[in-house]
Amino acid sequence: MRRVLIGAAALVAAWTGAAAAQDSGLLAFELGDVIGSERGCKLRFDQSAIERFIEANAPNADMGFMSQMNGAADIMADKFSGFTASQKTAHCTQVRRVAKANGFID
């Protein structure tokens, strides 16, 4: 019985760690989308606010966060030029709202 409980605890710890890593990857991707939209949406983000956001939300030991975030930012910057006017309007409206909600802009 004790082995079953230890095994169950290990399984929960592994699942929780995997879920946290997945959440971190999603956060990196979504932040990359926002940062990759900065130039196209003619915004200027507060660098200290971005730093505070990462400090508060990204796991300290996540070595993949930077490459995921940078990759997403590069992809978004490239995709943006192919957007229609309506896509740009919709995209930039939401990016502005997200940036404001997270303190990146006033």
Image: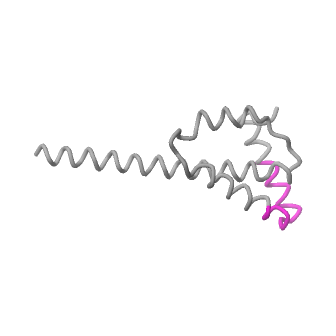
Above or below residue 105? Residue 16 is: below
Residue 11: percent from left, percent from top: 29, 50
Which residue is painted at 58% across and 52% down in the image?
A: 26
Which residue is painted at 80% across and 39% down in the image?
A: 45
Which residue is painted at 41% across and 47% down in the image?
A: 17
Which quarter of the figure is the C terminus placed in? top right
Name the chief secondary structure element in magenta: helix
Q: For the magenta stretch, what is the residue range?
A: 78-94
Total marks drawn?
A: 0
Residue 71: percent from left, percent from top: 68, 58
Residue found at the very far bottom of the displayed protein = 82
Whether residue 88 sits left or right of residue 57 in the image: it is right
Residue 46: percent from left, percent from top: 79, 35
Residue found at the very far left of the displayed protein = 1
Which residue is painted at 48% across and 49% down in the image?
A: 21
**Residue 81 is inside the magenta segment:** yes
Residue 2: percent from left, percent from top: 12, 43
